[in-house]
Image (cartoon, helix red, strand yellow):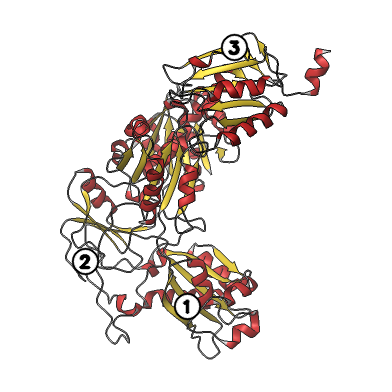
Amino acid sequence: MIGLISATAAGASARDRLATAWPDRTRVYDGPVREAVERAFAECDQLVCFLATGATVRLLAPLLADKSTDPGVVCVDEAGRYAVSLLGGHGGGANSLATEVGSTLCATPVITTATDATGIPGLDTLGLPFEGAVATVTRAMLDEAPVTLRADTVWPLPPLPPNVTAGVAGGVPTPPARPGGDDPTGPAADAAAEPSPRPADATTAPRRPLDGPTAHAPQGVPTPSAPGAVRPGAAVLVSDRVVPLGPADVVLRPPSLVVGVGASRGAGVDEVYGLVVDVLRDAGLSALSVGELATVDAKADERGIVGAAAELGVPVRTYPAGVLASVDVPNPSDAPLAAVGTPSVAEAAALAAAGRGGELLVPKRKSSPHGRPAMATCAVVRRAPRGRLAVVGLGPGARDLVTPRAVAELRRASVLVGLDQYVDQIRDLLRPGTRVIESGLGREEERARTAVAEARAGHAVALIGSGDAGVYAMASPALAEAADDIEVVGVPGVTAALAAAAILGAPLGHDHVSISLSDLHTPWEVIERRVRAAAEADIVVTFYNPRSRGRDWQLPKALALLAEHRTGTTPVGVVRNASRPDGTSHLTTLARIDPTTVDMMTVVTVGNTATREIAGRMVTPRGYRWQSEGAR
């Protein structure tokens, strides 16, 4: 909840505008300002104070406790010109809140956090749990001091600045094996004795909310280092293992672990949760890297399992018994087969949830309560890292038509793949350290394969295209190459057809279709059949790729096909470089259009039999009954 506090009539006016815009997210605190701030600070996750920053600082000072728990605070001035992130920019979400407030109130967000100001991703904003000296490592990154990135494997992180480099022998140091370990090469070999300095200890880390961080992280392919290697300077570690941390180390916890859990009816939360914690500790694994618990459908509402997941702050995924029965496991048992219809719950569920490439780190282990039979089992599987491919539509060319979501994905990507002229349009939006792979026209297949290969290598990749990437653009060839071993995200963009329609008026007010006249990938016979079908169905048609220097007869032929079913006075809109500074547009008719004025940067929209030119605009009626009645 966001608490809203104001002291004057002007502040109250802006406060009420925000409350009206966000009715489910905000709560207005009336009364004396000091009391209102104190109540909101105690009750809310974030505050927006319509007060001077100095006054707000004085009111907040006695209330501050810890940056990890204090709410984020944004100040808005009396005139509503600025939204200042004052407290808890990252941890309290004040930076993003200031941006939202600014967008809603038409105010300028003011964010002074060093990482945001310089375009460097904050280590505490990556969406991954973290432990260690965040401030020290961040300072090193900002000061361009050497920072070493070491990881067990590659996770799709955002780009890190050039001074963050993979170590020559880059891996996370392996703690010494525990004395008396049974298998020096097994999971217990990674468990650390109490080291100095103290390791990041999963079992004492704060619990996460159920909708806790998700995996999105980036760059470089670090290689393993020698066990216990000394790390000079600052280091960023990416690991699910409990590792010793130095005074200038941060460890990021990827959601790489799946814990499979089985439980008898009535098993308690303490028994299930205690077993999971014990197993992770003994294997030297961090609870902050547990992404989910997995079990059989029949145990979806088992109190002990649901409660353990809540304690860990992770969801529960369930599978039908038949699915689990088909998973090959090392330790099948007759007991679960008789009880729930599968010879394995813990191992099978963990392997199923981890997916392709999952590695069984801890085989099935039973709880060990005193004086009674065990009622819980668990197993731990490490899932193979999945890279991330965002297919991003940049819109028709105007910067203000690039969506905020597209900008966010560009800044999240550590690798950008695109046509050179499109890369030039958005190069200034990329974070420092982004690796750019660009190529020219005609190399679409190469770009699609490169983007997928980079994602398969574990990176966060953005593959860009103009308009909407799914419309005559890069999404189709990329997704044809991609399998289920990578995450794929589509980011819609404003298409050329939509941008042109907005310029022309409302030509797409009823059913419409887009048809590319390029026969480079589609035989003309197929294109002609589609144009005929649209003509006979009386559908508004937008032609993409209408004419080029070496392909000049297709547009006249397509227009002739439409003319067989529409009059010569049918409106036609011709728009070149829609939304760009050098864009042009004009209205003509089916009988008067001059195909020689059209090129590959043009879209041609042909109306249906109801389309009209009204006040210089192209309008296709929607067919509302009230419009028909008004016309009569």
Q: Which x, y percent locates residue 113?
A: 32, 39
Is any atom of residue 315 visible in this view? Answer: yes
Dot 2 falls on a residue whose secondary structure is: loop
Q: Is residue 262 above or below residue 473?
A: below
Residue 462 is marked as none
122 vs 262, left or right, is left
466 vs 143, left or right, is right
Q: Which residue occupies 31% across, 85% down?
A: 181
Amino acid identity at mark 2:
Ser
Q: Nearer the viewer, residue 294 or 166?
A: 166
Q: Nearer the viewer, residue 508 or 71?
A: 508
Q: Nearer the viewer, mark 2 or mark 1?
A: 2
Tag 1 residue = 275
Amino acid identity at mark 3:
Thr
Q: Which x, y percent locates residue 231?
A: 18, 62
169 vs 352, left or right, is left
Q: Which residue occupies 55% across, 90% down?
A: 372
Dot 1 falls on a residue whose secondary structure is: helix
Q: Nearer the viewer, mark 1 or mark 3?
A: 3
- The CA distance from mark 3 to mark 2 is 69 Å
- The CA distance from mark 2 to mark 1 is 32 Å
Q: Is residue 464 above or below residue 496?
A: below
Q: Which x, y percent locates residue 10?
A: 50, 22
Pick whichever of labels 1 and 3 is earlier in the sequence.
Answer: 1
Residue 225 is marked as 2
Mark 1, Cα crowd under 10 Å, few <14 / some 14-19 / many 20+, is many
Tag 3 residue = 588
